[in-house]
Amino acid sequence: MVVRMRHTKSHTANRRSHHALKNTNFAKCENCKELKKGHTVCSACGFYRGMKVLDLVKKTEKKQKKAKAKKA
């Protein structure tokens, strides 16, 4: 099948001009001052918007316990 009206290179380029990847913006955590991605829980302390959301100590202990069980 032959395309009857094909798009010009400039038309295609104009459409694709919005396909570029954007840089990620980092913000400082209010609690520990580490850099973190916006709108996400801080991976260093587990706080989000001033509230403790993740218990990272418990999480690492669980991960170590699981690795030890897998090893044995």
Image (tube, rainbow, N blue to C red):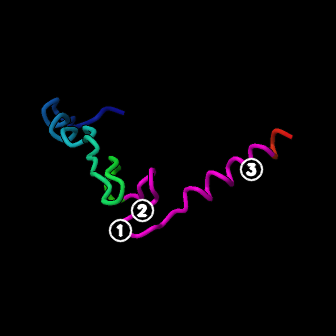
Question: Callout 2, which amino acid?
Answer: Phe
Residue, disc 3: 65
Residue 36 colored magenta?
A: no
- Mark on residue 47? 2
Percent position (x, y) of residue 28? 28, 52
Callout 3: SS: helix
Relative horizontal placement of residue 25, taking residue 62 as reference (left or right): left
Which image quadrant for residue 22?
top left
Which image quadrant for residue 42?
bottom left
Callout 2: SS: strand
Residue, disc 1: 50
Question: Callout 3, which amino acid?
Answer: Lys
Question: What residue is rendered at 62% in x and 59% in y?
Answer: 58
Question: What residue is rendered at 35% in x and 68% in y?
Answer: 50
Report the Cα–Cα distance between label 1 and label 3. Answer: 29 Å
Badge 1 or badge 3: first in the primary sequence: 1
Question: What residue is rendered at 42% in x and 58% in y?
Answer: 41
